[in-house]
Image (cartoon, grey):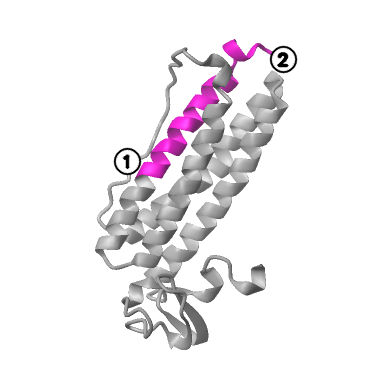
Amino acid sequence: MGVSFESSETRLNLMRAFAGESQARSRYLFAAGLARKQGLHVIEGVFTFTAGQEGAHAKVFYHELGKLCGQTIQVDGAYPVDLYPTVLEHLRAARHNEYQEYEHVYTGFAKTAKEEGFPEISHIFSEIARIEQIHGDRFGRLADLLEEERLFVAEEKISWMCLKCGHVVEGAAAPAVCPVCRHPQGYFVRFELSPYPPNRL
């Protein structure tokens, strides 16, 4: 049986989700800054890219609150303090947080919205939950590569792309310096992890 949106738990969950996504965006931008300082520009790029998507999620959730414009919604929430000294710790924390949203938070919010009679909002929560799983997978893969010291080396010859100029080179390791734009190794990414590789277009 449906309830009015103005008295629903769903409206509170939308505000919680908006707050959570907004904070995730900021945390990822902070982590990107740390990666930049450590010369890990490929990880900086992933954090920045994901921060943009979290901002888009926040906008979707906030938009759904439009009919309550002018009101103030008070919610409780629990949000992580991720102020780690290493990029690896930030990647592991980001993976954990994304999976929490996927497995628990947004799945629960979707169920509540459906029960309260808001199927479209339930669908939004479910779809964004799936995106958060992708984010978690991506952070986890990069964390594994960094921890295993395989971020810039491979067991066999593979293709590497410079994220600065787009140069692609074959080798068991990324070049120390891009031969085209002269940017350091930190800008190289495994080609299969690069944005828009040809075999996926």
Count of picture labels: 2
Q: Nearer the viewer, residue 194 or 19?
A: 194
Residue displayed at 46% across by 82% down: 154
Q: Secondary structure at mark 2?
A: loop
Q: Earlier in the sequence, mark 1 or mark 2?
A: 2
Q: Which residue is mark 1?
A: 81
Q: Main secondary structure of the magenta part?
A: helix
Task: Calculate the distance from the C-alpha at mark 1 to the C-alpha at mark 2.
Answer: 36 Å
* Magenta range: 1-26
Residue occupying the point 44% across, 14% down: 72
Most foreground residue, 149 or 164: 164
**Percent position of residue 157, x then y:** 51, 88
Quadrant that contains the C terminus: bottom right
Task: Say which amino acid is labelled 2.
Answer: Gly
Provide residue 97's location: percent of width, then percent of height.
46, 45
Measured along the vertical axis of the image, is residue 33 above or below residue 100? below
In which quadrant of the rendered image does the N terminus lie? top right
- Residue drawn at x 40%, y 31% as measured from the top left: 78
Residue 76, how many percent across, how many down? 42, 22
Q: Image quadrant of residue 36?
A: bottom left
The residue at which mark 2 appears reads as 2
